[in-house]
Image (cartoon, rainbow, N blue to C red):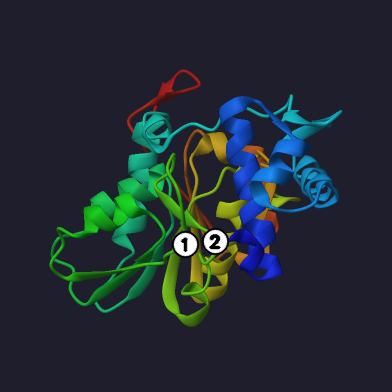
Amino acid sequence: MKITDQPVALKAALRHDTIRRAIEVNGRVSIADLSDRLGVSEVTIREDLKHLESSGVLTRVRGGAVMSRNGAMEMSLEETSTTNRAEKMAIAARGAAMVEDGQTIIIDVGSTTTYMAKALSPSLSRVVVITNGLNIALILEALPGVSVIVTGGTLRPLQHSLVAPMGTLLLDQLKADIAFLGCNGVDPTRGFTNSNIAEAEIKQAMVRSATKSVFLADHDKIGHVASAFVADISSADLLITDEGADATVLGNLRADGLAIEVVRSTVIHGGGTR
């Protein structure tokens, strides 16, 4: 099916994702080339670039756009899995311990949530996991008491994730007990944010589809604001982080009513062993 045959909302989401990928690979995109490639007018492409610039993805220049000066090339899932590994594993273990027999849960894509999938007990029974992470689905294939539902959508190879278009359709039809979500930023004012707009849309649908939302975020995410909005602080039921998180920011988050669990890990922060 051609892009021009799809509903307007899906066409826009697909164009934006295509433009993001092109600029990540080449560092620059041309209005004329994008117009020809996507089968839309140059006026439409200019509006797309304006939207993406407002989200911090790119900077418009004459005839096209370049990667945002404030942006950085997205790291692969394999690369992010090596960052703050001990903290992520401790956070993941706490999340995995919350899962009970008979529950339906959502596990978001990401390095910490991947560790959570690996930490789930092999003795679990009658658990249904809904995920947009292809790697997570393959991990859970080994657990006999866990049934896996994959959301569907468009593949983002760097994260092995499924996103729009079509990424939210299944989530809108299901109801989960708990959604375990990753993010790139947690801020008292800006809420939970993510660096990729397409993935942020999926996370929003996950929050809507779950009775309880639990965010898993290591200390580097606390106090940081990424480009794409996911949820207000009030939309989360629990944040699980590690002892390296900024105490002042955590205090402000608690003052806003967010429940927080701080886990211990065997790493050094500020001169002390945790």
**Residue position for label 2:** 202
Quarter residue 22 falls in = top right
Say which of 191 and 110 sits in front.
110
Viewer-proximal residue among 227 and 89: 227
Amino acid at the residue labelled 1: Gly
Q: Which residue is mark 1?
A: 153
Q: Position of residue 73 (x, y in %)?
A: 57, 28
- Work out how far the residue at label 2 is from the one at label 1, CA to CA, in angstroms: 10 Å
* 111 is higher (above) or lower (below) than 256: above
Amino acid type of the residue tagged 2 in the rendering = Ile
* Residue occupying the point 47% across, 62% down: 153
For the residue carrying disc 2, how many other residues have a C-alpha within 10 Å: few (<14), some (14-19), or many (20+)? many
Count of numbered badges drawn on the protein: 2
Q: Are marks 2 and 1 in contact (CB under 8 Å)?
A: yes
Residue drawn at x 16%, y 70% as measured from the top left: 145
> Which percent across, then down, holds residue 81?
37, 35
Q: Which residue is painted at 49% across and 51% down in the image?
A: 182
| Kind of element beneath mark 1 | loop
